[in-house]
Amino acid sequence: MVGVSRQGRRVGLICWQQSLGESADLILSPAPIHRHGGGMIQSCYAWPRELEADLREALGRSFNLFHYWGPLASPRVSHWIAEATAEIMTRSRYAPDLLLTYLPALDYDLQRYGPEDRRARRALEQLRGDLRLLLKTAAVMGYEVLIAGDYAITRCGAGVILPNRRLAESEWMATRRVGRMDYPDYFRSRAFTLVDHEVAWVYLQDPRDADAVRTILAEDPGIGSILGPQELEARGWGHSRAGDLLLTARPGWWFAYPWWTDPARAPEFDRHVDIHNKPGYDPCELFFGWPPLSVSRDTSRIQGTHGVDGPGREVAWAATWTPATVPENWNGLVSAVREWMEGVG
């Protein structure tokens, strides 16, 4: 959700992904402290520093990180974020002119159970309640509102793609043995993959190996396309931090990060919520596994995924203002917002 007042001078980011380090006037983001002996101290990064304490006092409860991600993730966390956003809009001390808020309500049960499941529909109803609160508050406080979703979660279940396993078996991806566990050795790997739902980046030590690695990965039945350096440059995706190959999945398939075949060889972080060590996104963290308090490793439990453009996956948006040109995609929506803000700033 984006709320915009008529000045456009101060900016706030509420649970906006990757917001730490941004030059915003107001920031609130989950920032837990991981204990060295295991476990976690719940915490939020806030700027101004007193923002988190003020919100905790006003709402009567703290932000619950266990509801934000992991097996206990719940649409209830979106309600806290929505209430916090509404509270910020009403306080002249904090209220920015541009306020960007991320509501994660639909991320959880749509991935767990698929978009047609009753639990996914229930999450949608909870989100509607949160949006009603924000629209009402915005109207009172003089904000215009844009509600947008930049991806559509669709049903999966055809299978899971394991590009790192193929690269490890063909000795392109290197590992190092720690006890009985195989950890990735990115420094010695000639190729490894960073996965994210229906897309994955392949990073190469030597870009001249692109064709050889493409041939190996193309054997997987779940691969929809493999774009090499020339195709990436032609699409404007040749960023310095991007990989050398971009993989996309066929409908119903998604990418997972594991490279081992023997569960006993899995690294210790595999059975934990650990977004910092796993090479890519792991939706299995949405389920409990065995032993107790670990996360699941059963990829067949995942019923929803996203990432590849296609029919029915267009950006969804609604606004209390009318753009000069109706956008057809996410980039068009961003441009429309920028043009509108320049006109009212």
Image (tube, rainbow, N blue to C red):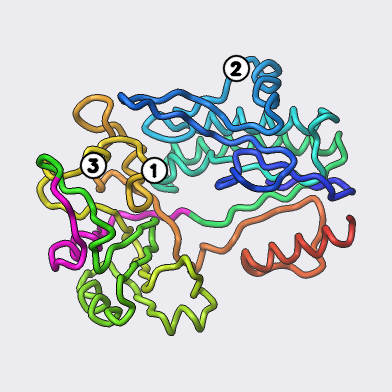
Q: Which residue is mark 3?
A: 297
In the displayed structure, 255 sits above or below 145; it is below
Q: Position of residue 241 (x, y in %)?
A: 47, 65
Q: Amino acid at mark 3?
A: Arg
**Marks 2/1: CA distance?**
26 Å
Residue closest to the eye, 17 or 344:
17
First of labels 3, 1 by sequence position: 1
Residue matched to label 1: 275
> The disc labelled 2 sits on which kind of residue?
Arg
Residue carrying label 2? 61
- Decide: few, some or many residues near mark 3? Use Cα within 10 Å; few <14, some 14-19, many ≥20: many
Q: Is residue 172 left or right of residue 156?
A: left
Which quadrant of the figure contains the C terminus?
bottom right
Q: Residue at x 22, y 69 (%)?
A: 220
| Residue located 59% across and 32% down the image | 45
Whole-percent x, y for residue 146 in the image: 73, 50
- The answer to whether residue 161 is magenta is yes
Q: Residue furthest front?
A: 187
Q: Residues within 10 Å of mark 2 (few under 14, many from 20)?
A: few
Instruction: Please tell me in which quadrant of the rendered image residue 317 appears.
Output: bottom right
**Residue 176 percent across, percent down from the top left:** 16, 51
Which corner quadrant of the image does residue 84 belong to?
A: top right
> Magenta residues, as a range?
153-177
* Left or right position of 326 against 125: right
Tag 2–tag 3 contact (CB < 8 Å): no
Choose the circle earlier in sequence order: 2 or 3: 2
Q: Residues within 10 Å of mark 1 (few under 14, many from 20)?
A: few
Which residue type does callout 1 highlight? Ile
Q: Secondary structure at mark 1?
A: loop
Q: Nearer the viewer, residue 197 or 43?
A: 43
Residue 157 on image: x %, y %: 29, 54
Q: Secondary structure at mark 2?
A: loop
